[in-house]
Every structure is written in C-alpha cells, then in structure tokens.
Amino acid sequence: MMQPYDLYSTYSIAACDLDAGELGAAVQTHQIGVGSRILWLEPGVGALVTQSLANIGFGPVGLAMLAEGVAPKSVIAGLVGSDPNADRRQLGLVNAQGQAAAFSGARCIAYAGHHVGAGYAVQANLMTRPTVIEAMRDAFETTTGDLASRMLAAMDAAQAEDGDLRGSQSAAIKVVPNRLGVPEAQRYVVDLRVDEHAMPLLELRRLVKMRRAFLVDNKGFAAFAEGDKAGALALWEQARAMSPEQEELPYWQAVKLAEFGDLDTAATIMRLALTNEPRRAEWIDLLYRLDAIGLVGAPGNGAALAKRVE
C-alpha cells in the first residue's frame, strides 16, 4: 500500500548529452529524501523520473523496456496503460540515443505540465506558478557546461519561479556514462542527494562542486600511475583549487608522493591539507598508522613525512 511519503509531487529533469556521453536526472521537492525513489538511471540505456503521486514501479520497468529498445513514447504508453491511476502520474524519460518523452496525467496537482526538448524532458506539478516549465526549458537550453551544470540550471530556474507551492526540502542529481558495460565502481559520474535542508539546491551545488574536484583528483592519480608525474601534479593542483575545503585531496596526494619517495613535494602538499586543520594531530598520527601497514611505500616513509610536517 502506498504511503503518503511516497506521493512525491515535485519538479525534475531527465536528460542526455550525446557529445559528452552522459545520461542524467535531477529533482527537487518539499519532502524528505526525494533522491531515494524518483531518479532511475542505467548506463547506456536511459534516465527516467517518476513523480506526482509517483508510481515507483515505473522506474525499473521503464528502464527494462528502454534496454529492450522500446522507444520512449512507447515506454510511456505501456506504463500508463498498465496503471489504473495513471491520470495522477507524471514521468519523463530519455534514452541513450537522446530521444525523450514525458507524460502528465489530467489529475496531477496544479500547476502541472511538462516539456520535451532535444535530448531532455522537464516536468513539474504542485507548482506555485505555471511559468516553471518554461523557465526550466530556457535555462537548460541556454546554459553551457557539463550535463550536471545544465540540469542544475534548470532546477534553479524552477526555484526562481517559486517552484513547489510548499517550498523546498530535498534534492538529488545523478549522472551516468552513456555506454553499456560500465563497471559497478564507475557506474555514477555524479550521485548526490540532499535529503533534508532549508536550501537543498544550494547545498546540492556545493556537493557537485566537491564531486567535480574529486573526479579531477582521480584523473591525477591515474596520470601518476601511468608515469606522468608532472600531469598528476597539475591535475592535483587543479582539484585543490576547485575545492579547497576538502583536506582529503591534498592529504592523499601527499601520501602517494611519499609512497614513491618524493618526501619534499609530499610535505609541501601535506602542509596544505593540515593548515588550520583542527584535527591536525590526528591526521599526522594517521601517517604513522599507514606506515605501520605498508601503505606509504618503503618502511619509514610515513614517519619521515610526519616529522616534516609536525
């Protein structure tokens, strides 16, 4: 039996960036934990959003249909045709080829509607004003940058039109690679949720910024593993500049350098991690603990780095 907290009424977007090879979806609502039920994505298959007295079952079934090659409009026809309460449902989806479709039942809570554009669908219900859909469309189509940036712009535009009649409480965004066979560990480019917050979109933007820095940091580690130390250092510096509040970034960069014997550069970067860090002593203690189990290369590297920054 569906409970009141399953009856998500909200605004969202499902989108595809064929050039970047990404599928994504984003949502905001005035209910707790919207990201756990509304967004459904499968790499190389599609992205789907189900909302407005949501039929959560539309998510897995819709993705399965897309995986079988069913066109988005036909997916909607099948899902809606199987649901006796379809007139209260709303959904939007896009497949791996960038074909999109959306549906808004006649009994969705006003103001409700949707728009299907090239490679995306936006949908909203229980909106304060009927201008939300147009604002989302315009923002997504005119914003430059990666798919996450464009979807966040659509979300912000909806909120600028006062969005949900009740206000805002939770938000989420997901981006996956638009290719099949993605390893589970690489399934999500972005997978972030703000389950309860006074300004969830603002908080979500902060988290997306941190995630971007993490992805650049990962590229640095990949470059280092391939023997491109100069490239790694440049990428690591870029990551630190993108998200200076993340002490984890310079810390583990320094550990990796120490592992391969470059204690001077490691110490320089480690000091960045520990500047104004209230748990400085604990982070330094961790170097000794890592050293003890051989995670800083040759025995004593961790201790040597700790002594340089103590």
Image: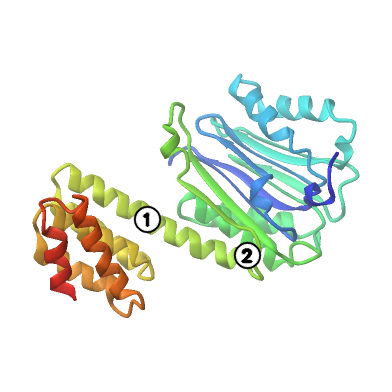
Residue sitting nearer the eye, 111 or 174 = 174
Residue sitting nearer the eye, 143 or 302 = 302
**For the point 68% across and 35% down, which residue is it?**
59
Q: Quadrant of residue 159?
A: bottom right
Q: Quadrant of the C terminus?
A: bottom left
**For the point 57% across and 67% down, which residue is it?**
202
Q: Quadrant of residue 10?
A: bottom right
Give the numbered dot on residue 74: none
Q: Which residue is mark 2?
A: 200
In this rendering, the answer to whether 307 lies above or below 216 is: below
Residue 308, horizontal then vertical, whole percent: 13, 72
Q: Identify the amino acid type marked 2.
A: Pro
Q: Secondary structure at mark 2?
A: helix
**For the point 83% across and 25% down, which residue is it?**
82
Residue 303, horizontal then vertical, whole percent: 15, 64
- Answer few, some or many: residues within 10 Å of disc 1's Cα (few below 14, many 20 plus, some between 14 and 19): many
Q: Which residue is mark 1?
A: 214
Q: CA–CA distance between discs 2 and 1?
A: 21 Å
**For the point 55% across and 61% down, which residue is it?**
204
Residue 144, horizontal then vertical, whole percent: 48, 55
Residue found at the far bottom of this picture: 276
In this rendering, the answer to whether 76 lies above or below 92 is: above
Residue sitting nearer the eye, 139 or 31 = 31
Task: Looking at the image, tell me whether mark 2 or mark 1 is earlier in sequence order.
Answer: 2
Residue 192, horizontal then vertical, whole percent: 54, 53
